[in-house]
Image (cartoon, coloured by chain):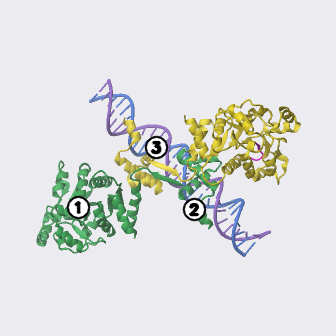
Chain colours: A yellow, B green, C blue, D purple
Amino acid sequence: MNEAYDELAFEPHEEELLSRVAWHYYHDGLTQSEIGDRLNLSRIKVSRMLERGRRMGLIHVHINSSYGGCFALEARLQEIYGLDEARVIPAQETGNINDRLAEAASQYLMGRLKDQEMLAVGWGATVMGTLQRLARTLSYRDISLVSLTGGVSAYIEGVASGRSSQNVHLIPAPLVVSQESIAEAIRAERHVVEVMSMARTANYALIGIGAVADEATLIASGYASRSQFEIFRRQGAVGDIIGIFYDQNGVPLDLPFHKMLVGLDFEALSAIPQVIAAAGGPKKVEAIRAAARGGRIDVLITDEPTAEAILEKDQA
Amino acid sequence: MNEAYDELAFEPHEEELLSRVAWHYYHDGLTQSEIGDRLNLSRIKVSRMLERGRRMGLIHVHINSSYGGCFALEARLQEIYGLDEARVIPAQETGNINDRLAEAASQYLMGRLKDQEMLAVGWGATVMGTLQRLARTLSYRDISLVSLTGGVSAYIEGVASGRSSQNVHLIPAPLVVSQESIAEAIRAERHVVEVMSMARTANYALIGIGAVADEATLIASGYASRSQFEIFRRQGAVGDIIGIFYDQNGVPLDLPFHKMLVGLDFEALSAIPQVIAAAGGPKKVEAIRAAARGGRIDVLITDEPTAEAILEKDQA
DNA sequence: GCGCATCGTGATCATATGATCGACGAAAAG
DNA sequence: CTTTTCGTCGATCATATGATCACGATGCGC
């Protein structure tokens, strides 16, 4: 009982003294020695009072920024899913969420990428936005780009424009073809084999996460149909990464669709040291959560409401 | 313009970084070096970011206590009125305000009084309460008590009971007598002269502040009448200290009543190194403010609403 | 009453922090 | 294009802080 009391409350006079010490320290900016002199306490006692005040919540530090609430979410995401790193950007009404995720992802990568490293990239709107923002940094730091799948030519070309394209390596094929046999043939092409084996040596992979929803970029760009998506969903698909659909535990499904893809598989992706996913939005909550649970990604960049929704599901 | 910008806002990315640094520092308890390692910043830069965040209000420290708001009032009281010290106790519905002031005053004095010093005491309910609480400390530390006026016997006796009374020196007379000639005669008494000159040597004086209101203790104890108070008020009196009434600037009035007092005058009171006043309540706002403005007191102990009211009047 | 455990205290020392300085680089002025 | 000025950066050093230790007081059980 005595311990509990000590942990939860102060004697009334002690609270006054503690508050006064904290006020001088944090508000007036006095040193602990100065406070001690003024209040007739030893410096060490002032130090201990401050520590006690902090531990007991009497002293509360508020970070007056929209980012404030995000860092707690990041810490929980990292802990629960064993991520190397999580980045959560604050909720905000204005502005396209993909743009803001792309901004965050590019800033993360700018801080990570060292000269002459290699970045493998997946597929999706957020990935494209990120690369656009990174363009200058990439050329300046002599970073190589390599694609993880087919179908990325269109936007990577734009990014690579204006600099020597010698260190941009694309899989010269669509993301999906119409028959398994064609996919096999393409994957056997010497140039394709070369790019894919180069992708396996990348230091980082930047990927998007797709939801199994009608708004998916895969459908919008004609690589898949709504009816296919409906079938995937019935088979337990909750999301896709580089065209590979997985269930709620992040385990890839056995779908005919996968056989028609031109790109790396999950095993090869996991072999890349750091897989960075940038994705957010209400439709993608389950897809992101499953990818994280399955250990498909090492770094997650998402937004605050999405992070909250993801964690809420794992509370129970 | 550039300066103004720097002072008021961050670049968006800088705010994120700054928030992150602050979060690690204050929330996670990491050292500046650890944060620097983690975010690829030099330690010194982390230090500067934190300082910047503090200066710009991004980092806000809240003291989660009812005392929180009081210290700002104390600082302003000290500054505006040139007090050595101000103590403001938090607003609270429960409990008698005089008791709480007496508690605060006794704690203040316990911290100040050194062994074998001498405390001169004035007149009033708060002073009495303070002395009761101090009784044990006084005898333990061999503190001498001396009265500033007559009329204190009743309650000082109680305080002094149980210990040798040799270092309690009272003016053996009422506070007020009925005629000027009698007052003069008493003041000329050898014993009275001795006690009064001893009072002048005290290290501290503890006094109350009276309002010019019908509830005043002076009226309740029969030393003055309501009609007298009405006259004092018409002459500009806003309060009294040890029976001496003063105007809104703290300047003593020239009243016949003062000639019938047995006790020290303002000049003698001011000569005491530290005059400590404990007083509070809505009726006393003007009395306290005038005393402070006139430099009648060195230390003020009051309550939060009273302090706010006093300062509000001096805002304009 | 006498150890024994526990807590609070201050002394001492290692570490964390922030002040100062000179150097560098970018932007503005010539 | 050169020069100047300003601001930023990190190195160095003085100071502030907190970890550890040993002591003395207090309370508890034997």
Q: State the image coordinates of residue A11 (x, y, percent, origin top left).
A: 35, 45
Left or right position of A3 against A224 = left
Q: Residues within 10 Å of mark 2 (few under 14, many from 20)?
A: few
Give the position of the C terminus of chain B as an image quadrant. bottom left
Q: Secondary structure at mark 1?
A: loop
Query: Residue A36, relative to residue B226: is it above or below?
Result: above
Q: Nearer the viewer, mark 1 or mark 2?
A: 2
* Amino acid type indicated by mark 2: Leu
Q: Which residues are magenta?
A: A114-121
- Do dots 1 and 3 share one subunit? no
Q: Is residue B78 visible?
A: yes
List the residue tagged with mark 2: B8
Give the position of the N terminus of chain B as an image quadrant. bottom right
Chain letter for the residue marked with disc 3 in the picture: A
* Amino acid type indicated by mark 1: Gly
Q: Magenta segment: does it hold B122?
A: no
**Of residues C23 and B213, which is closer to you in this image?**
B213
Real-space Cα distance between discs 3 and 2? 32 Å
Q: Magenta segment: does it hold A116?
A: yes
- The dot on residue B122 is 1
* Amino acid type indicated by mark 3: Arg
Real-space Cα distance between discs 1 and 3? 43 Å
- The dot on residue A55 is 3
Q: State the image coordinates of residue A81 (x, y, percent, origin top left).
A: 62, 36
Image mark count: 3
Q: Secondary structure at mark 2?
A: helix
Q: Nearer the viewer, mark 1 or mark 3?
A: 3
Real-space Cα distance between discs 1 and 2? 52 Å
